[in-house]
DNA sequence: TAGAATGTTGCTTGTAATAGTCAACAATTC
DNA sequence: GAATTGTTGACTATTACAAGCAACATTCTA
């Protein structure tokens, strides 16, 4: 039940873009450094994100990548779909033909509920939520210091 | 985000035991056949389930395995824990030391919520729930035929 | 008490997915 | 036109998973 590094790294890369929204294209090099991702690996992660319309790229000097839409319009479910493929814990959820037992299998029903629970979280979270979470962490409530 | 076959097969094997509760020890051979699991593979799956106190085994002729507790007392979370290990989608949830960014990482918070969602389903489902689901499927409401 | 039936365990192997690197290429700016 | 950047494809570990095989331990029954 592990998320691939593709999804984890990709999400962090997008968060970086969201945090630096308005700065224009950001170098892959900078994202890789900031988020501690190997550059050649990151290069591969952006391809599906571009194809999926989540980011835009600019070539040449002063090039880089940037979000194609506002952070509040980009749900995590979209990111995982592009980088992880389906989030179904077993193949037979998306493709009942994958197993001859599908129609009568009770365990399959549980795994289906599992997928729904996962989807619920991913559908309900946007990049903007991550940005706000980040701000909250880096600027903790000052009242804390008065306790 | 896939469940291992260990968990899938193991759950089905336990369901089989729950369905045949009261019959005494069931042959591994029979479970393997009924649930279409390779016998040598199934043999390996039962070890952790015995160690975890979910099933009991009886050696020798007329031996086999059976549930160590009532189906309503066996939660799926317990089964996945024994067969899958943790259900956390990333290592840093259970072990913050796995990544130096843990304390400041916002994406980690999302993956934590993912784990909670998954745990919620698994904690809230028992083997007895599967048994009842199975009964419902094999004995569909007769009124269906009068439509 | 012997031997057959069953679960138990450890060793080994095949396979596939993942993670990652390297290098050639394309486009853009200055 | 040369430097800088993203793009793509080929390639290579590495790892985890799934599975098989064989020797072993235990128990029942004849």
Image (spheres, coloured by chain):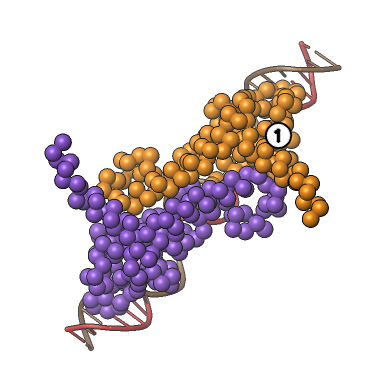
Chain colours: A purple, B orange, C red, D brown
* SS at mark 1 in the image: helix
Position of residue D19 measured from the top left corner of the image (x, y, whole percent) = 64, 45
Residue B61, placed above or below residue B3:
above
* Residue at the image point whose x is 21% and y is 51% from the top: A138
The answer to whether residue A11 is visible is: yes
State which quadrant residue B92 falls in: top left
Which residue in the rendered view is the most extreme toward the left? A146
Q: Residues within 10 Å of mark 1 (few under 14, many from 20)?
A: some
Position of residue A130 measured from the top left corner of the image (x, y, whole percent) = 32, 56
* Residue at the image point whose x is 23% and y is 76% from the top: A62
On-image quarter of the C terminus of chain B? bottom right
In this picture, residue C16 sits left or right of residue A121: right
Position of residue B15 measured from the top left corner of the image (x, y, whole percent) = 66, 37
Position of residue C15 measured from the top left corner of the image (x, y, whole percent) = 58, 54
Residue A17, placed above or below residue C19:
below
Chain containing the residue with disc 1: B
The answer to whether residue B40 is visible is: no
- Number of numbered callouts drawn: 1
In this picture, residue B27 sits left or right of residue C23: right
State which quadrant residue A126 falls in: bottom left
In this picture, residue A45 sits left or right of residue C13: left
* Residue at the image point whose x is 63% and y is 30% from the top: B71
* Residue at the image point whose x is 63% and y is 34% from the top: B128
Instruction: Report the residue marked by disc 1.
Output: B19
In this picture, residue A141 sits left or right of residue B127: left
């Amino acid at each position: 039940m592990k998320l691939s590094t593709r999804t984890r790294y990709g999400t962090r890369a997008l968060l970086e873009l969201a945090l630096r929204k308005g700065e224009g294209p950001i170098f892959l090099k900078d994202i890789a450094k900031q988020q501690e991702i190997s550059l050649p690996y990151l290069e591969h992660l952006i391809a599906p994100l571009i194809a999926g319309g989540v980011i835009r790229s600019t070539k040449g000097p002063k090039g880089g990548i940037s979000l194609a839409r506002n952070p509040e319009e980009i749900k995590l479910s979209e990111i995982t779909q592009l980088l992880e493929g389906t989030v179904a814990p077993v193949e037979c959820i998306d493709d009942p033909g994958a197993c001859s037992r599908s129609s009568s299998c009770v365990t399959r029903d549980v795994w289906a509920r599992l997928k729904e629970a996962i989807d619920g979280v991913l559908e309900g979270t946007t990049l903007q939520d991550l940005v706000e979470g980040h701000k909250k962490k880096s600027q903790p409530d000052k009242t804390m210091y008065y306790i």
